[in-house]
Image (spheres, grey):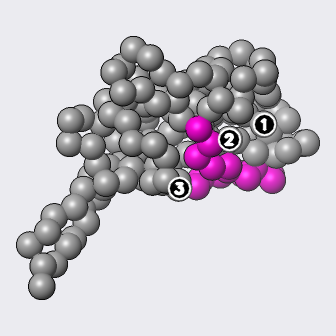
Amino acid sequence: MATFTQTQNARSQSVLNMGTLASAAYAASSVIDLGSAIPLDVTIEVECDPNGAPVGNKQVVLFAKLSLDNVNFSSGPESGTDTVNEADLHWIGTLPCNDTSIHRKFFSLQGLAVARYLKLVVKNDAGVPLASGNVYMAGISGLSA
């Protein structure tokens, strides 16, 4: 019987620096090329430090925009505060931010449509600007022996 093992790549440099992202604002990464041998999954790490006590929804929301050709990406906001087309984004997960501490959570791309190119999009829904924040990733590959 074959044995299947998974290997996780090293944590990337920041693929999205949220900096001091304003409350209710979006920010997007540059295009991320997963390569012609698309990983089985991608682990995404989101960290943020609210600048003050969060109010309202107290969260940072992570989305993806996907593309098969690095030209035509799924629709939805990448910047600003207009939420009209937010539902067009592919939801990945939500990082709760209930206090002024640094918050960190891990997410998976598994379950989304498979596409070679993507942009990660965050929405600061914490009710206060961020003092800092970053998004990192690591691909998961597999081997059958």
Q: CB of mark 2 within 8 Å of CB of mark 1?
A: yes
Q: For numbered disc 1, what is the local secondary structure?
A: strand
- Residue for point 78% across, 24% down: 83
Q: Which residue is mark 1?
A: 125
By secondary structure, the bulk of the magenta-drawn segment is best described as strand
Q: CB of mark 2 within 8 Å of CB of mark 3?
A: no
- Residue for point 72% across, 23% down: 85
Snapshot quadrant of residue 122: top right
Q: Local crowd at mark 1 within 10 Å, few (<14), some, or many (≥20)?
A: many
Q: Is residue 96 magenta?
A: yes
Q: Which residue is mark 2?
A: 61
Q: Position of residue 126 (x, y in %)?
A: 80, 39
Q: For numbered disc 2, what is the local secondary structure?
A: strand
Q: Amino acid at mark 2?
A: Val
Q: Which residue is mark 3?
A: 106
> In what quadrant of the picture does the C terminus appear?
bottom left
Q: CB of mark 1 within 8 Å of CB of mark 3?
A: no
Q: Local crowd at mark 3 within 10 Å, few (<14), some, or many (≥20)?
A: some
Does label 1 or label 3 sit earlier along the sequence?
3
- Residue for point 53% across, 55% down: 106
Span shown in magenta: 90-105
In this view, 93 is above or below 119? below
Say if residue 20 shows up in the picture.
no
In the rendered structure, the answer to whether residue 142 lies left or right of residue 81 reads: left
Q: Position of residue 24 (x, y in %)?
A: 79, 27
Q: Amino acid at mark 1?
A: Asp
In this view, 38 is above or below 18? below
Q: How many marks?
A: 3
In the rendered structure, the answer to whether residue 121 lies left or right of residue 139 reads: right
